Image (cartoon, grey):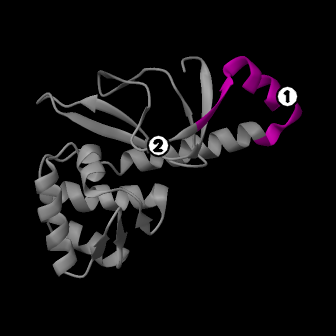
Amino acid sequence: MAGHLCLVTEGLLKKEILTPTGKASIIELIGPGNICGCSPYFCGGRIASDAMAVIDTVVQCVPLAKSFELGKDNPSWFEEIARNLAFRLRRQNSLRCVLAENARLKVPGILLWLRESTGETIPLTQAAIAKVAGLAEETVCRELATLKRRKLVDVSRGGVRITEPSMLKRYLERL
């Protein structure tokens, strides 16, 4: 909602832009405990859309005017907002692989990026990961199979668990 600060309590939101090739690329994922301002903003000369749910999501919205009132009586409110926004900016800087067109880079990059929001087990189906990545589901399945053969991930119904995050990072750096 425009003019609000929103706290995600369950689920996952995404913000995306259109790449020069016309494909949608996610620039930010917002998981439980994260705050976002739901209004359009510019990113790399393009306007990004409002946050959209990737999976079923519960969001608590506070009007901006009310959020400033909360901050008067509770300075830690502003500290939390600043901490949260700094964390999200650091994550956006790590999007090099997420924005890549190469699926071999994009799939492990997306998994590592999602892990920051969801923890060791990413509770998304392969179809949902494909949607987040902007790739065909078959492409994601093929790349996940490669990562599974290398014992970097476990794939199960409704989720992917990164078994060796440091090895997955090294694998990604070698590509």
Tag on residue 56? 2
- For residue 63: magenta? yes
Q: Nearer the viewer, residue 146 or 88?
A: 146
Instruction: Considering the whole magenta stretch, tell me its main secondary structure.
Output: helix
Task: Spot the residue most to the front.
Answer: 157
Depth order, front residue of 141/112: 141
Q: Say if residue 97 shows up in the picture.
A: no
Instruction: Name the residue type under label 1.
Output: Lys
Q: State the image coordinates of residue 111 (x, y, percent, origin top left).
A: 32, 60
Q: Could you say where residue 122 lies in the image, as x and y percent from the top left?
A: 40, 62
How far is mark 2 from mark 1, CA to CA? Answer: 33 Å
SS at circle 1: helix
Q: Is residue 35 left or right of residue 24?
A: right
Q: Which residues are magenta?
A: 59-76
Most foreground residue, 157 or 34: 157
Which circle's residue, 2 or 1, is located before the other in the chain? 2
Q: Which residue is mark 1?
A: 72
Residue 3, image x and y in percent?
A: 59, 17
Task: Answer with the quarter of the image where residue 23 lies.
Answer: top left
Labels in figure, total: 2
Asked whether disc 2 touches disc 1, contact meaning CB atoms under 8 Å apart, the reply is no
Q: Residue at x 20, y 66 (%)?
A: 144
Amino acid at the residue labelled 2: Asp
